[in-house]
Amino acid sequence: MFRYPLLIIFLLMTFGICNNISAQRGPQGHNFGFGIIVGEPLGGTIKYWFNSENALDADIGGSYFGSPRIDVDYLWHFDAFQSRIVKLYAGAGGALGFGGSNNGFLYKGEGNRFYVREGDNVGFGIRGLFGLNVIPNRSPLEIFLHFGVLVGLAPETGSAVDLALGLRFYP
């Protein structure tokens, strides 16, 4: 039997929402892109543009702290540089971590040292992020860098900092 039924439900809901909305605002007018993300987490990434300012992105991969993790964020893009190529964005979303270690969250232990809590739990947290994306002219690519704060809510509270660099391709 599949060990993570919540993961399947989550992915079906995400793709179901994306298929019912039409948009064209990513590179070269495409609305859906996929690629890789390096940092926290390390793995795959997808992005769906609703319009020229709003998008939904999701990342799935291994956390630096050892456990698999899924992040989903709603993003607001803004033109701080008066450029068609470089934009800033801010976002809010959630993260699910699955077993193996601390589910991607840091905990403060004795002597104010951070540690990784061992366990086989599913962890949940919320996060906020701020980033920069670059969409070169006449290119199906998006390069992004973001920084965020993750607050673990369950099974225990904790916090962590996310930093990631990625590349998405828009077919």
Image (cartoon, rainbow, N blue to C red):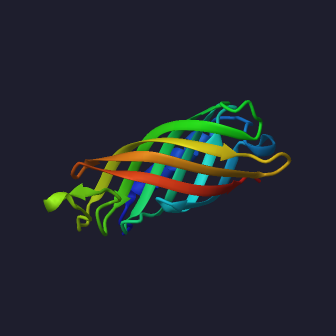
Instruction: Kindly indicate the quadrant of the structure image that contains residue 20.
Output: top right
x and y percent of residue 115 in the render? 24, 64
Image coordinates of residue 90 in percent, x first then y, are 53, 36
From the top left corner, tell me how far across and down residue 79 is, in percent: 68, 30
Q: Going 15% across and 60% down the picture, which residue do you hit?
A: 111
Q: Reply above or below: 155 against 118.
A: above
Left or right position of 81 against 67: right
At 64% from the left and 59% from the top, the residue drawn is: 35
Q: Is the residue 116 above or below the residue 169 in the image?
A: below
Q: Is residue 97 left or right of residue 62?
A: left
In this rendering, position of residue 158 left or right of residue 83: left
Q: Nearest the camera: 139 or 112?
A: 112
User: What residue appears at the point 81 percent right and 44 percent down from the top-left corner?
Assistant: 28
| 170, 41: nearer the viewer | 41
In the rendering, at what x and y percent does residue 93 appear? Answer: 44, 41
**Count of marks overlaid on the render:** 0
- Looking at the image, residue 139 lies above or below residue 85: below
